Image: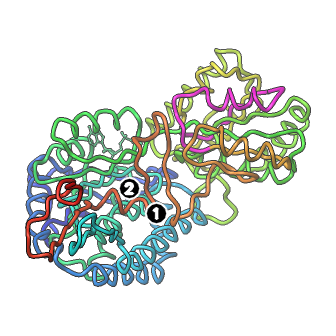
Amino acid sequence: MTFQNFIGGTWKPSASKKTFLKVNPANIDDVIGKFPQSSRADVREAAEAARDAYKHWRLVPAPKRGDILRKAGMILEARKDELAREMTREMGKIFAETKGDVQEGIDTAYYAATEGRRLFGHTVPSELPNKFAMSVRQPIGVAGCITPWNFPLAIPSWKIFPALLCGNAVVFKPAMETPKTAQLFVEVLIEAGVPDGVLNLVQGGDEAGKAVVDDPNVNLISFTGSSQTGAIVAQNCAKRHKRVSLEMGGKNAIVLMDDADLKLALDGVVWGAFGTTGQRCTATSRLLLHEKIHDKFLDMLLKRVEKLKLGYGNDEGIDVGPVINETQLKRVLNYIEIGKSEGAKCLIGGKRATGNGLGKGYFIEPTVFANVKPDHRIAQEEIFGPVLSVMKFKTFEEATQILNGVRYGLSSSLYTKNVNLAFQAMRDFETGITYINAPTIGAEAHLPFGGVKETGNGHREGGWQVYDFFSETKTIYVDFSGSLQRAQIDNYES
Ligand code: ADP
């Protein structure tokens, strides 16, 4: 099956007619389809179509734009299972999780729909008599949305729904690993009534992404991906004075105090570390154990990890799916070798899984390293796979220091019953998100999402805050005095 780009309301192949093949990472013999390999010319056409459509879309009342997004939410809801099945086939995470991914899109759509009736500005008293002052929210123009593959519906919805609601047109460049979900997502929005040209889909890889950033018709960029690529995107945006929002890597940790509910923590650690095969930017990649419960908890953890069932996520009873592709497989296996060579102890897993019919997929056994030191590479670098690095600490202060001692700052977690420590963690853990007695994953669509340090550049997705990114503030003064009133001068004349 060959799929196409969607530009100016028309499905069409890339100008060069080049395509790329997408396969199921749980079974590479299962071909999902051929998708357009887009280049600069396709992006230019999409951005021009968006620029044109923007002229009308910006004038559609925001509540009306919200109605279209509500309809999109309803269609997503009706097609939830079908979309989730396709997503599991395309990128590997298990069916329960891909349903969660679609649900996040539904939640984001309904939130956006109601935001259409808010989009608040401010009214403020003027310092002069018979003068009215206010600020209103206005669209910006064409938004370039560049997305990764690990949340192939949720992340595009986080960007595209608020962008559209605010009155922007969109050029959407999804990851090459999840073109089918992107295709289905765009079909839903067309069915919901998004007018021609307002949403444009350009499939392809890094070249297409770069072209979106460079295109003069694109005014702002919302990017989620690696910190390395994010830095390049930011530099290219700076050259053109484009607004840019970056969501990047993480090296998230759970801290387990000696008073914690260990059973509760066990559920959280396993879910945080091995959910989505560890391929979340919020995945629990480090586990910091208080020395008093270190051995006991490790023992509990290994017994649980041993039972995790690897397989195709659309089959019943599977806990962990494959990693996304061969590059990622090699990268994660390489990190496992690095861990061993640095002196950490691999307690379980540590290799590719090929038995029980898994040989056609990119499966890695859930892996736990103990004796990890805070400066080890597996304790510092984002692995993006089913690998957990365990460290031991003596005091909460030491744990805080280890937790904060990385380049990233996305998510963190503390398990304790001590309310004072909980509040210290909320204040002192240097991350954009902190969980108490819950793992590092589990963001809700109506709260701000994002990180500090090399994880982000100060913007947030989700909730109310993302609407600031996708809109411009305009300040308006209306003088109904009938005479020239000079601010700061006439009202202070002695
Ligand atoms: P990952 O390592 O998670 O695959 P990347 O950061 O490489 O993530 O890519 C995230 C998204 O950014 C993808 O859609 C990719 O095609 C796109 N991309 C890659 N390089 C660039 C670039 N230089 N400019 C814009 N987009 C890019």
Extreme residue in the front direction: 494
- Which is nearer the eye, 484 or 161? 484
User: Residue drawn at (30%, 75%), measured in percent from left and top?
Assistant: 189
Real-space Cα separation, disc 1 to disc 2, in angstroms:
8 Å
| Side (left or right) of 142 relative to 302 | left
- Magenta segment: does it hold 400? yes
Q: Which residues are magenta?
A: 384-411
| Side (left or right) of 65 relative to 316 | left
User: Residue drawn at (24%, 46%), measured in percent from left and top?
Assistant: 209
Q: Amino acid at mark 2?
A: Thr
Give residue 478's position: percent from left, percent from top.
Answer: 17, 72
Instruction: Report which residue position mark 2 lands on.
Output: 178
Q: Amino acid at mark 1?
A: Met
Location of ligand 1 given as a quarter of the image: top left
Examine the rendered structure and indicate whether residue 457 appears above or below residue 122: above
Q: Is mark 1 within 8 Å of ligand 1?
A: no
